Image (cartoon, helix red, strand yellow):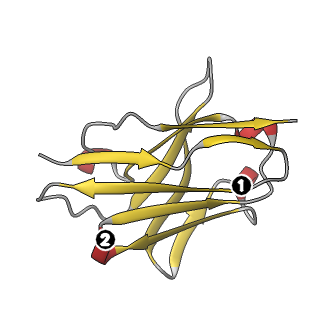
Amino acid sequence: QVQLEESGGGLVQAGGSLRLSCVVSGSGFSPTGMAWFRQAPGKRRELVAVIFSETNTNYIDSVKGRFTVSRDNAKNTVYLQMNSLKPEDTAVYYCNAFLIKERVSWGQGTQVTVSS
């Protein structure tokens, strides 16, 4: 059974940085791409960033130039480096496969709170 465990969130002031980690455990999970999502209070979960390879990544417009997604295959870990954080980045962040048909059960997520 595949499990996703996110960590690295916290409380940070606007302009600060955080690095999120997503550790994938279990076997039989080889998604085409891995993605980070976020869900703010009262809002739907949204896609934030996707990594297909080290040279093929995509971001939503609101985080371009501030967030960087990467991965370490040897550690089965995907990262999200978040710089110049804004209050509107406040949300619970999750990782999962980019393609819906490849997704597994969601993890608990990690809370990111950015104060103004």
Mark 1 in CB contact with mark 2 (< 8 angstroms): no
Please name the residue that numbered disc 1 is placed on: 63
Judging from the image, what secondary structure is the residue with disc 1 in?
Answer: helix
Quadrant of image for the C terminus: top right
**Amino acid at dot 2:** Lys
User: Does residue 60 sit above or below 40 in this rendering?
Assistant: below
Residue 58 percent coordinates (x, y): 57, 65
Please give the name of the residue rendered at 26% of the width and 37% of the height, measured from the top-left corner: 105
Q: Count neighbours of disc 1 (C-alpha within 10 A) and say few if under 14, some if 14 to 19, many if 20 or more.
A: some
Mark 1 vs mark 2: give the one in front: 2
Please give the name of the residue rendered at 49% of the width and 51% of the height, measured from the top-left corner: 36
Residue 50 percent coordinates (x, y): 49, 60
Please name the residue that numbered disc 2 is placed on: 75
Report how many numbered discs are placed on residues in the image.
Answer: 2
User: Does residue 75 sit above or below 15 in this rendering?
Assistant: below
Quadrant of image for the N terminus: top left
**Pointer 1 or 2: first along the chain:** 1
Q: Could you say which is closer to the camera, residue 42 or residue 83?
A: 83
Q: Could you say which is closer to the camera, residue 9 or residue 26?
A: 9
Please give the name of the residue rendered at 15% of the width and 54% of the height, measured from the top-left corner: 26
Q: Is residue 68 left or right of residue 7?
A: right
Residue 2 percent coordinates (x, y): 18, 48
Please give the name of the residue rendered at 51% of the width and 44% of the height, measured from the top-left corner: 37
Q: Is residue 44 left or right of residue 14?
A: left
Q: Is residue 115 left or right of residue 100?
A: right
Q: Could you say which is closer to the camera, residue 48 or residue 4?
A: 4
**Amino acid at dot 1:** Val
Residue 110 percent coordinates (x, y): 50, 39
Q: Mark 1 and mark 2: span between their CA atoms?
A: 25 Å
Extreme-top residue of the structure = 42
